[in-house]
Image (cartoon, grey):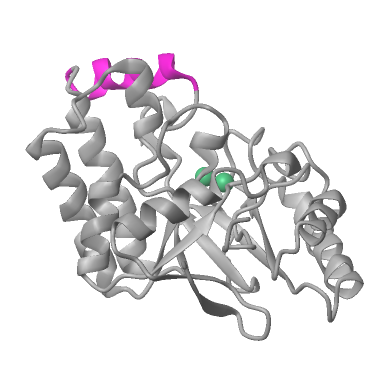
Amino acid sequence: MSLTLSSAHVHTTLCDGKTPAPDMARAAFEKGFVSLGFSSHAPQVFDQRYCMLPENEPRYREQIRALQDEYAGRMPIYMGLERDAYACVSAEDYDFYIASVHYLKWPGGFVAIDGAAEPLGRYVRERCGGDGLELARRYFGLLRDYVTAEKPPIIGHFDLIRINNRRLGLYDENTPVYRGMALDALRPMAETGSLLEVNTGGVARGYLTTPYPDAFLLKEWKNWGGEVIVTSDCHDMRLLDAQYDEAEELLRSLGYDHAVRLGKDTLWERYALK
Ligand SMILES: [Zn+2]
Ligand SMILES: [Zn+2]
């Protein structure tokens, strides 16, 4: 049984998830979760297949409020958002939000970092002169600027570009130049007080073999005094705590003795990893 017993990164059928919110809450409660945080993709004006439609935002709030009442005194439920850098709404009325970068802007519109490989490959060819590292530089630059400007509660899937690097072979993740670039983007985020998400979603869905972010980043994050939160980026209730044991083991192996989760009595609480 994993120790985290919570996820602050959960999608439902109101955005691109497969499980309706009430079923997700029931699954969390049956697993003995101490808390649950919903984080629908915030509305955006493009690529609306993946986000909550603006007209569904009031429904989302109603649904989560009803679940908060239903589980009151048993399992606190938090209303959050996963807010892309290009989302069109603010997160100020929410309990928390996850700051993520899923897109880069280009004259043709927006290209998804974690979408189909082909358009991203075309972006690299046409806009980055075929240089995959240039794509990484732009992605990390955008995320760094977003996080340092807004100091969000949670930094979402820090090295999301790994998913399509696997498919497109854009650069070698073990080279000093890539690692230095990623570390340079992460370093200023340690000053924001934001939680760095250890996101098991990519492993749970079979796209990756280790969570976001890569271990070399987690190791430095700890040296800089950063705090982490384990989440499942769950789109299907069967994967609500998938790969949590492995993520906790990875954190222990890097010297972490605790992580942070959505709390029972306070918004955030620490819990021991052993
Ligand atoms: Zn995301
Ligand atoms: Zn997500």
Q: Is 146 drawn above or below residue 237 in the view shown?
A: below
Residue segment shown in magenta: 116-129
Q: Quadrant of the N terminus?
A: bottom right
**Could you tell me which residue is drawn at 11 percent across and 33 percent down?**
175
Residue 251: image location, x then y, percent: 37, 57
Q: Is 244 drawn above or below residue 265 in the view shown?
A: above
**Could you tell me which residue is drawn at 21 percent across and 70 percent down?**
224
**Viewed as shown, does residue 233 lie left or right of 18?**
left
Residue 110: image location, x then y, percent: 44, 32
Is 45 or 236 nearer to us in this picture? 236
Residue 235: image location, x then y, percent: 67, 41
Query: Is residue 152 visible to the viewer in this orientation of the structure?
Result: yes
Q: Is 36 drawn above or below residue 208 in the view shown?
A: below
Q: For the view shown, which residue lies furthest in the left direction?
A: 176
Query: Is residue 86 visible to the viewer in this orientation of the structure?
Result: no
Which secondary structure type mostly characterizes the magenta part of the structure?
helix
Q: Is 246 drawn above or below residue 248 in the view shown?
A: above
* Rendered image quadrant of residue 204: top right
Is 106 or 123 nearer to us in this picture? 123
Q: How many marks do you count on the picture?
A: 0
**Viewed as shown, does residue 29 lie left or right of 43?**
right
**Could you tell me which residue is drawn at 44 percent across and 68 percent down?**
152
Is residue 2 inside the magenta stretch? no
**Viewed as shown, does residue 206 lie left or right of 5?**
left
Residue 179: image location, x then y, percent: 16, 42
* Rendered image quadrant of residue 14: top right
**Could you tell me which residue is drawn at 58 percent across and 33 percent down?**
47
Is residue 122 inside the magenta stretch? yes
Is 32 or 268 nearer to us in this picture? 32
